[in-house]
Image (cartoon, rainbow, N blue to C red):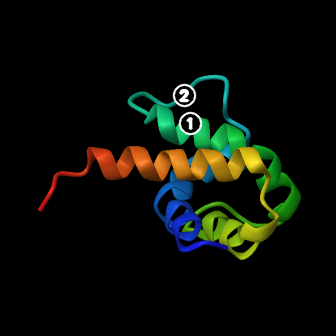
Amino acid sequence: MTMRLARALALSVGVGMLVAATGVFAQPAPGANPGTMALAQACRGDVARFCPDVRPGGGRIAACLRANAAELSQGCRAAALASMRDRSQAEPTR
């Protein structure tokens, strides 16, 4: 697992995985970050495959995905990296 992937998962997966784990994709939450929704959709199968018994909340889904980062689908990895890139571009420079 690369540090970049680990950071992307740590920063991005939490909210998106809560949505993915509950299967709520029909209507995004008001004000939901489109990148987070894309990440949740891209990783939905990975959550079902690697984390079927993990209860959402408290970062448990994100931790499960980090633990299985080497096995994640290409789509989930790409979405995580894109989400990290989008977030880093949106952060103000210090």
Is 54 on the left-hand or right-hand side of 6?
right
x, y percent for residue 45: 82, 47
Question: Which residue is under mark 2?
Answer: 28
Using the image, determine if residue 61 lies above or below residue 85.
Answer: below
Direction top: furthest residue: 27
Q: Residue at x 42, y 27 (%)?
A: 30
Query: Quarter-wise, where is residue 23 in the image?
Result: top right
**Amino acid type of disc 2?**
Pro
Look at the numbered disc 1 and give the secondary structure of its residue.
Answer: helix
**Amino acid type of disc 1?**
Met
Quadrant containing the N terminus is bottom right
| Residue 19 appears in view | no
Q: Which of 56 and 65 is in front in this view?
A: 65
Which label's residue is closer to the chain start, 2 or 1? 2
Look at the numbered disc 2 and give the secondary structure of its residue.
Answer: loop
Distance from Cα at disc 2 to Cα at disc 1: 7 Å
Q: Nearer the viewer, residue 37 or 5?
A: 5
x, y percent for residue 72: 78, 59
Q: Residue at x 17, y 51 (%)?
A: 92
Q: Which residue is drawn at 59% across and 35% down?
A: 38
x, y percent for residue 18: 61, 51
Q: Do the residues labelled 2 and 1 touch (CB within 8 Å)?
A: yes
Q: Which residue is drawn at 46% across and 61% down?
A: 11
Is 77 on the left-hand or right-hand side of 10?
right
Question: Which residue is under mark 1?
Answer: 37
Query: Quarter-wise, where is residue 53 in the image?
Result: bottom right
x, y percent for residue 63: 63, 72
